[in-house]
Structure formats: structure tokens, C-alpha cells
């Protein structure tokens, strides 16, 4: 299906830019480019934009605390700025304030089988917090984090929140998470209201060909619905990005892998107080309380549907209701065994949705292996070859900041 947005100014807009992929990265990029005067065509394989991993995500606005497995702080340094700038940038892009934000500091609970010790986590968090205090964007997060301290929970506090059979230590971090479905709805509305964007849904990108740049057009983008020429292409696809890059001889990969993960999105009939927490560091889980009646839960082992290192030929799985039911039951049971308060969600739930998407990483191995490169995200960002931009966001929270940089590179400041 092709959704055309007409504009009397369209023929005058330059340059012509193709944005591949209608997730958070693609939609933010398309909006920023179009508002600066570019003629943007946004391609999406699904019947609607923002139906994939960008909608079904935990929404953590990362500051680096998750990556205690990377003691070098290189991953943290790579993702901090995007996290600090996320809120002002996304609110500017969607034109409204964010709702459904976790209201309390995220907890990090160190599992007894963690790949790093509590003392290591304590040292890493201290180093990271000092890094945040020195960052020029420290005032842009949810309140100033200048005076933030990463506090270790006392044994009494820890046992009130978690099962000591599974948890060795706990820490308070300044991180927040947002409900990604709300952001997806707002981004979708903004895209369809923007006259400079032509949205082509149900158009899977098959590949591209280089074109004679002397004509002012650099690439022929081929999809299941058409083939069209553009001067700039921004590849914001997720699982399909490596294959489309490869079609024009671009390879930005270093031991890449794809994992298809599912999580639970729970709504309850009454307000329930549970902590927003990450169980770290390894193949464990997390829980988010966006508001007292809306929650996110994941457990790595039950939610991991499939994984592959053949990133050029990944096929999205289709899950039966029985399979989704098994994921739901195991996730709730596993999280409940670590964080007892979460057990109340099952009895009060009015709706439990099992949804998921691909996780791309320039890394391989098992999260239970401390030497696995999955514990790093320091190779993310924008890879440019001519007028072809391939973007690995790394984490959801990086997208608006990277979109801003792509728009600057294409159209200037």
C-alpha cells in the first residue's frame, strides 16, 4: 500500500531522501529531514509504521548502567549522550510531553549467577556516575543528575524488595523508562501530519543499486512495490539492515548477531506498587512500572525465541497462542521468584500481551559468558559511505540523537 501526502511545494524540495524502515530511528529521521525542507520517502515493510521492535520495547533511557560487563566504560561513553538528550529531543519531535514514565529510580539487583560481582558493579557504577556528573548534558535528563549518587541497598532494604535466595546485592540508579507504545502512537501521528513525508507501507526494501551521481541521483532503491532513485539513502532498518547494506557493497559488521525476544505488557484492574528493576548482569530479566496499572516484564531465557549469526537471512518467527502462553507463564513465575511483589500482577491483570522483535548486536556469544561481546555496545552509530547512511542505534534511546546527527550531515545545521 502506498500512502501519498500531497504538497504544492513537493516539487521544489531538495534533496530527495529515502528513509528505510518505519521504526523510531526511521520516523525521527524522516521528520527532522522533512521539517528542514527535504523531500522524504519513508519505506516500511509492515502495513503500518512503528509496529515492530520500536513499539514492543522496554523503553529504558540508557545511561550505561546496564553494561557493567564492560568495565572500560566504552559502551557507556557511546550511549550516554543519546540517553541524556532523549527526552527533550523526542518531545520536540512529537510535539508533546511524554507520559507513562517510571517515576522512581531504577534498581539494579545483582543475581547470584551474575557474570560480575557486586563489588565490581559497585565500582563500575561509581565510575559511571562520576562520568555523568562531568557530562555537559547532565541537566537534560529527568531532573538534574548532578547530585545523583549510586547507592547500595542495605541488607534490610534488599530483602524487602527481592528474594535473597537469588539476589546478592542491589543498587539505585537514576535511570528512567518510558512506555514505547505511547511514543510510537505520537510519532506515527506526527509522520502522517507532515506534508514533506510520503509514507510507503507494505513496501519491503529488497536492496539498492548505485546510480550515476552526475544526474543528481545516487541510488536506486528497489522494493516489493516499486523502484525509485534518490540522492541520499538512510538505512534505518533493524533486522533487514545488513542485507540491504550488502546489496551495494557496504559492510559495517563485526561478528553480528540477531536475537528475537518477546516480553510481557501487563495492564491491571487496580493499582499495584512494584519496583522498576533490572536483574543483572547476564541472562536474567527486568520489570518496569510505567504507572501503577501498566507494566513491562521480561525474562531472558523464556523470551528468547530464536537467535542467529546469519544476519543476512533472518526470518521473523510466528508464535502460536500456546507458545505465547508458555512465555507469559514462565516470565511471570521467574520474575516473581526474584521480586515477590510482582506476583500480584498475575491476579490483578486484565490484559497480558506477549509481543517482541529483533535485537541486533555487533556481538556474539552468551550473556552468561563474561567474555561475550554481547556485553558491549561500543560500535553503534552512523556509518556513512558516500550518500548512503547506515544507522545502528544500539539502544532505543539513541534514536532521536542519531536522527538529529543524520539530518545535520545531509542538510547542515
Image (spheres, rainbow, N blue to C red):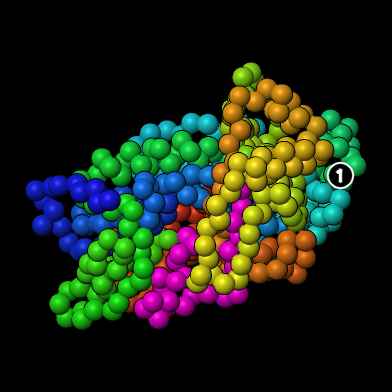
Name the foreground residue: 94 vs 7: 7
211 displayed left or right of 110: left
**Who's the residue at 75% across and 46% down the image?**
279
**Who's the residue at 47% across and 70% down the image?**
242
Name the foreground residue: 356 vs 13: 356
Residue at label 1? 166
Res. 277 in view: no
Rendered view: 43 above or below 55: below
Query: Residue 398, how many percent across, how many down?
Result: 49, 54
Asked whether 273 falls inside the magenta stretch, the response is no
Query: Residue 167, how many percent across, how many down?
Result: 85, 44
Query: Residue 254, how many percent across, how many down?
Result: 57, 75
Provide the secondary structure element on which disc 1 rests: loop
**Who's the residue at 65% across and 46% down the image?**
323
Rendered view: 116 above or below 154: below
Q: Which residues are magenta?
A: 238-263
Res. 182 in view: yes
258 displayed left or right of 401: right
Amino acid at each position: 500500500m502506498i500512502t501519498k501526502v500531497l504538497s504544492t511545494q513537493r516539487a521544489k524540495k531538495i534533496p530527495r531522501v529515502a528513509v528505510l524502515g518505519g521504526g523510531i530511528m526511521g520516523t525521527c529521521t524522516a521528520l527532522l529531514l522533512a521539517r528542514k525542507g527535504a523531500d522524504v520517502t519513508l519505506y516500511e515493510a509492515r502495513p503500518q509504521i512503528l509496529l515492530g521492535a520500536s513499539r514492543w520495547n522496554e523503553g529504558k533511557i540508557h545511561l550505561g548502567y546496564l553494561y557493567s560487563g564492560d568495565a572500560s566504560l566504552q559502551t557507556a561513553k557511546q550511549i550516554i549522550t543519546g540517553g541524556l538528550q532523549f527526552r527533550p529531543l523526542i518531545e520536540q519531535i512529537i510535539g508533546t510531553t511524554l507520559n507513562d514514565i517510571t517515576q522512581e529510580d531504577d534498581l539494579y539487583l545483582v543475581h547470584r549467577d551474575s557474570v560480575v560481582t557486586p563489588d565490581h558493579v559497585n565500582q563500575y557504577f561509581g565510575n559511571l556516575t562520576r562520568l555523568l556528573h562531568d557530562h555537559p548534558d547532565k541537566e537534560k535528563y529527568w531532573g538534574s543528575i548532578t547530585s545523583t549518587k549510586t547507592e547500595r541497598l542495605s541488607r534490610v532494604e534488599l530483602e524487602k524488595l527481592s528474594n535473597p535466595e537469588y539476589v546478592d546485592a542491589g543498587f539505585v540508579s537514576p535511570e528512567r523508562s518510558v512506555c514505547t507504545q505511547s511514543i510510537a502512537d505520537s510519532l506515527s501521528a506526527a509522520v502522517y501530519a507532515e506534508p514533506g513525508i510520503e509514507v510507503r507501507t507494505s513496501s519491503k526494501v529488497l536492496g539498492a543499486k548505485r546510480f550515476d551521481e552526475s544526474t543528481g541521483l545516487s541510488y536506486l532503491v528497489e522494493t516489493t512495490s516499486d523502484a525509485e532513485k534518490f540522492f541520499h539513502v538512510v538505512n534505518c532498518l533493524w533486522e533487514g539492515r545488513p542485507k540491504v547494506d550488502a546489496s551495494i557493497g557496504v559492510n559495517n559488521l563485526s561478528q553480528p548477531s540477531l536475537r528475537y525476544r518477546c516480553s510481557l505488557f501487563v495492564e491491571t484492574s487496580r493499582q499495584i506498587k512494584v519496583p522498576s528493576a533490572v536483574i543483572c548482569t547476564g541472562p536474567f530479566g527486568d520489570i518496569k512500572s510505567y504507572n501503577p496499572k501498566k507494566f513491562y516484564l521480561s525474562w531472558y531465557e523464556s523470551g528468547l525465541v530464536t537467535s542467529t549469526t546469519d544476519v543476512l537471512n533472518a526470518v521473523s518467527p510466528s508464535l502460536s497462542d500456546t507458545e505465547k502462553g508458555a512465555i507469559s507463564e514462565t516470565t511471570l513465575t521467574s520474575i516473581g521468584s526474584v521480586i515477590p511483589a510482582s506476583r500480584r500482577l498475575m491476579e490483578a491483570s486484565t490484559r497480558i500481551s506477549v509481543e517482541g522483535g529483533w535485537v541486533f548486536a555487533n556481538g556474539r556469544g552468551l550473556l552468561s559468558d563474561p567474555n561475550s561481546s554481547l556485553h558491549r555496545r561500543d560500535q553503534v552509530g552512523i556509518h556513512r559511505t558516500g550518500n548512503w547512511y547506515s544507522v545502528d542505534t544500539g539502544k532505543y534511546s539513541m534514536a532521536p540523537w542519531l536522527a538529529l546527527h543524520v539530518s545535520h550531515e545531509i542538510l547542515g545545521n
